[in-house]
Image: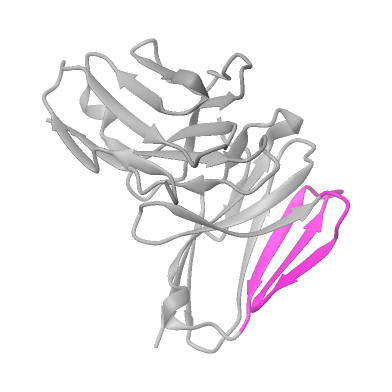
Amino acid sequence: GAGVSQSPSNKVTEKGKDVELRCDPISGHTALYWYRQSLGQGLEFLIYFQGNSAPDKSGLPSDRFSAERTGGSVSTLTIQRTQQEDSAVYLCASSAAPGGTEAFFGQGTRLTVV
Amino acid sequence: SQQGEEDPQALSIQEGENATMNCSYKTSINNLQWYRQNSGRGLVHLILIRSNEREKHSGRLRVTLDTSKKSSSLLITASRAADTASYFCATDWGGAQKLVFGQGTRLTINP
């Protein structure tokens, strides 16, 4: 596709349920990032994939959070046993090369845990 | 984990004035980028400055970088109402390749 695509755009889930958020990066981009942004706050780094290297998971807030990237393309961020504090906008970005190049962002998934 | 801190957190000016935002970071970097965000959704890349550059221009944007002070500034000249947005700096954190963002400056341009 022409840009980074995220789905769903909005997700409302009940506390304790699992959710999956999807990111389709720009074709050919080797780097993929996930961030979390609470209302009015900055971007909190979650996880970074680069090619076939082991992902940098240093930003994942707890073991309820996990992410995978299949075939070097599509990525899924999974949050298990969701809590109200997980409510935020989850942003995905991709870039043609590691951290030193321009990142292209999707429009995000707004997650609301009720 | 956050790398940068923007200053001020919020800035409100009149249309036509210049807006200056600052960013400080903690580790050595290869480059620094500035992004813009409208309405709390996707960010748009504005400009990238490499660690061996001191100043860069793009249209009404001027970015400076002082690696000795670990700081950067973004100047928007002749501001317009459409410049109202949040602005973030981002760096590769200590060459670790992941892209880490600051807390952002919320800029409001009053017509």
Quadrant of the rendering where the C terminus of chain A is positioned:
top left
The magenta segment is B51-77
Q: How many marks?
A: 0
Q: Nearer the viewer, residue B79 or A48?
A: A48
Residue beneath the point at 49% across and 42% down = A26
Residue B99 location in percent, x, y?
A: 61, 37
Name the side, left or right, on which A107 lies relative to B61.
left
Asked whether residue B76 is drawn in magenta, I would say: yes
Residue A71 location in percent, x, y?
A: 49, 20
Residue B75 image-quadrant placement = bottom right
Residue beneath the point at 44% across and 51% down = A2
Furthest residue in direction top, as rendered: A63
Say above or below: A33 vs B43: above
Residue B83 location in percent, x, y?
A: 47, 74
Asked whether residue A84 is drawn in magenta, I would say: no
Q: Nearer the viewer, residue A58 or A26?
A: A26
Name the side, left or right, on which A94 lies relative to B65.
left
Say above or below: A81 vs A19: above
Residue beneath the point at 70% across and 42% down = A100
Residue B31 location in percent, x, y?
A: 75, 47
Say above or below: B32 vs A77: below
Colour theme: one colour
Name the side, left or right, on which B35 lies relative to B51.
left
Residue beneath the point at 66% across and 78% down = B59
Name the side, left or right, on which A51 lies relative to B29.
left
Say above or below: B45 vs A10: below
